[in-house]
Image: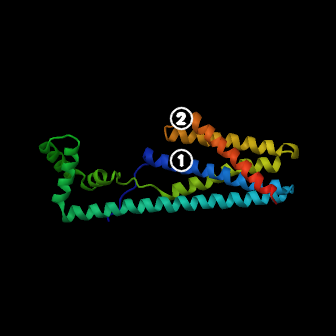
């Protein structure tokens, strides 16, 4: 396949990177607070609690980054394979490609004659761009970046888990549980707000849902810690 120049990021690419960040942040909050609460319920040694939380924060951040990298890389490989396929078909079956573009516009309600004229014009000007857009909804030169998603997830997961970790570590002993709960509520509400905006969902429901999930996580892991 000829080398395709990467163009300026589209809104979809930027949103994908932001989505990875939101998911990473939410996962960082829940996994880190889960470990912190479990350990803190079993021991009062702050150093032990801190090391457990820090270890989980690092593990979670790198796990999320690797997962995003693998996922987006697979998607990118699929997109590049589709481009290779269309590049080959344009050389070996141009008539079939022309018919595919024509049929695409016929299905949209354009007359066959006009559809054929449009297809000929598009394939004369931008053949490969036209075929991957019509067949696969891919914008040539705008493949999703696995590295952008990985780094976004890595840093956001670390940042999400950092708030409950700092709250548990540095809050006065008498207020550490209140500090952790408050940290989880605030960070969960923020990720809920951002995710609802990205998905055009209901902000109030998303925020409340995330807060409830965070509080349930604390409750379950506190119970687990008290068993030992």
Secondary structure at badge 2 equals loop
In this rendering, position of residue 44 left or right of residue 4: right
1 or 2: mark nearer the eye: 2
Residue at the disc numbered 1: 18
Residue 139, image x, y percentages:
35, 51
Residue 96, image x, y percentages:
18, 58
Residue 199, image x, y percentages:
49, 41
Residue 94: quarter of image: bottom left
Mark 1 touches mark 2? (CB < 8 Å):
no
Separation (CA) of disc 1 from disc 2? 18 Å
Image point 53% across, 58% down: which residue? 68
In this rendering, position of residue 129 left or right of residue 13: left
Image point 35% across, 59% down: which residue? 4
Relative to 206, say whether 92 is above or below. below
For the C terminus, the quadrant is: bottom right
For the N terminus, the quadrant is: bottom left
Relative to 1, say whether 12 is above or below. above
Residue at the disc numbered 2: 202
Image point 83% across, 57% down: which residue? 42
Image point 55% across, 61% down: which residue? 67
Does label 1 or label 2 sit earlier along the sequence? 1
Depth order, front residue of 130/55: 55
Colour logic: rainbow
In this rendering, position of residue 34 left or right of residue 198: right
């Amino acid at each position: 396949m000829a080398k395709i120049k990467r163009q300026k990021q589209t809104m979809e690419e930027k949103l994908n990177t932001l989505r990875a960040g939101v998911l990473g942040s939410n996962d960082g909050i829940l996994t880190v607070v889960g470990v912190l609460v479990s350990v803190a319920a079993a021991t009062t040694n702050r150093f032990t609690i801190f090391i457990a939380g820090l270890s989980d924060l690092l593990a979670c951040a790198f796990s999320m980054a690797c997962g995003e990298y693998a996922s987006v890389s697979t998607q990118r490989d699929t997109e590049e394979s589709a481009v290779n396929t269309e590049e080959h078909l344009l050389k070996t079956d141009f008539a079939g490609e022309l018919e595919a573009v024509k049929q695409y516009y016929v299905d949209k309600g354009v007359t066959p004659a006009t559809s054929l004229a449009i297809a000929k014009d598009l394939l004369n000007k931008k053949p490969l761009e036209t075929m991957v857009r019509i067949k696969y909804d891919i914008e040539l030169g705008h493949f999703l970046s696995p590295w952008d998603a990985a780094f976004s997830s890595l840093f956001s997961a670390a940042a999400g888990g950092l708030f409950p970790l700092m709250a548990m570590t540095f809050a006065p002993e008498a207020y550490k549980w209140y500090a952790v709960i408050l940290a989880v509520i605030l960070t969960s509400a923020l990720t809920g707000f951002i995710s609802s905006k990205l998905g055009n969902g209901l902000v109030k429901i998303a925020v409340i849902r995330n807060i409830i999930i965070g509080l349930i996580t604390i409750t379950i892991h506190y119970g687990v810690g008290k068993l030992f």
